Image (cartoon, helix red, strand yellow):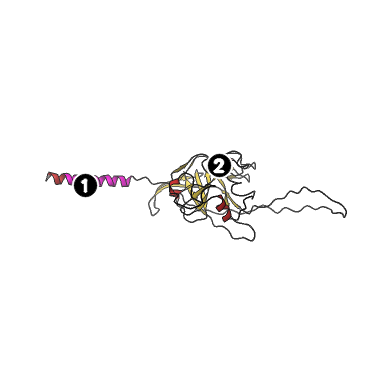
Amino acid sequence: MNKIVRILFLLGLGFLVICFLSVNTVMSVVPKGANYTEVKTENAPWHNPQDHDAYAGNVTELDITGYTITQNWQGYYGNVSGTIYLADASDNVLYNWSLASPEGEVYAANESSVTWTNIQCFNFTATGTYADDSSQRGATSFYGMNLSQLENSTDIEWDDVDGVNETFSLAGTHESGDGLTHDLFYTNNLEFNAGECLSTHLFNHSGSGADSQFQEVLLYDPDNQVVVFTSILDEEDVSGFDNEYHDFEMLVLDDGHGTDLDPTIYYFYVELE
C-alpha cells in the first residue's frame, strides 16, 4: 500500500513540474505586422535644360553635370509610435504601455510571411545553394542568396554606381558609409553585434550619412529566401534629409530599368522596445 502511495505521489509531483515548466516558458519577441498611413510620395524635380548658342565653324568644350533618379531603390522615411502590451491569443489586452517614440526596428520584405526564428545577416558571398542554413540563425548567412543573385533579381549591373554593394557594406567600407557601422540590435531575441551585418547610413539634414543616425542593415530569411531591409530605431525625432524630424529612413530595392514600371510590393513589420 505504501508503495502505491509513493508511486502516486511521484506521478503527481512530475505532473506539477511539467505544469510549472509549461507556464514559465519564455516567449521570444517576434516582429509583428505594422500598420501605416501614407503621408506623401514624391521624387526629385525636373531640371530645366540650359541653352547655348551654336555658330557654324566653332568648336566648344562643355563640362556637363546632370542628375538622374535611381532605377534601383525606393526610399521610405517617417515616424513610429506604438504600444508594448500584454495580451492573449485573441488580442485581448491585459495591460499596455504607450510609446510616443519607441526604440526597436522597422522591417520591410517583399514577402507576406517571414520566418523570424532563423533570421540572419545577408551575405554578399554566400554560396547561393539554398541548403539548410538554420544553424546560422542570429549570425551570417552561409548557403543563402548572394550579391549576384540579389542584383540579378532586380536587373542591377555589376558596375552600377547605385548597386547593392555600392550602397551597403561591412564596417562602412564603401564611400557612402564613412567608416561607420550599425549599433547592436535584437531581432526575435537574436543578438546582432555592432557592425556584424551589412549596413548603410542614410542622410540627415546636412546631406550626409556621416553620423550614427538613420542606420539600415540587410537581414535575410533563409526559409523564404527573402532579404529583409531593416531600419534601426536608435534615436528618435532626428532631423532628417528634408530638415524635418523623423524616427527612421530606409531604402528598399525595386527594378525600375527599361520598360519595367511594375511596383515591388513590400510588407512592413515592426519590433518595439
User: Residue sitting at 12 percent across and 44 percent down?
Assistant: 2
**Image side of residue 272 versus residue 69, left or right:** left
Range drawn in magenta: 6-29
**Image side of residue 39 versus residue 90, left or right:** right
The percent coordinates of residue 253 (x first, y second) are 58, 53
Q: Magenta segment: does it hold 113?
A: no
Closer to the eye: label 1 or 2: 2
Q: Magenta segment: does it hold 22?
A: yes
Tell me if I can see residue 215 in this picture: no
Residue type pointed to by label 2: Leu
User: What element does badge 2 sit on?
Assistant: helix
The percent coordinates of residue 55 (x first, y second) are 87, 54
Residue under label 2: 170
Count of marks overlaid on the render: 2
Residue under label 1: 11
Sequence-wise, which precedes: disc 1 or disc 2? Answer: 1
Tell me if I can see residue 7 in this picture: yes
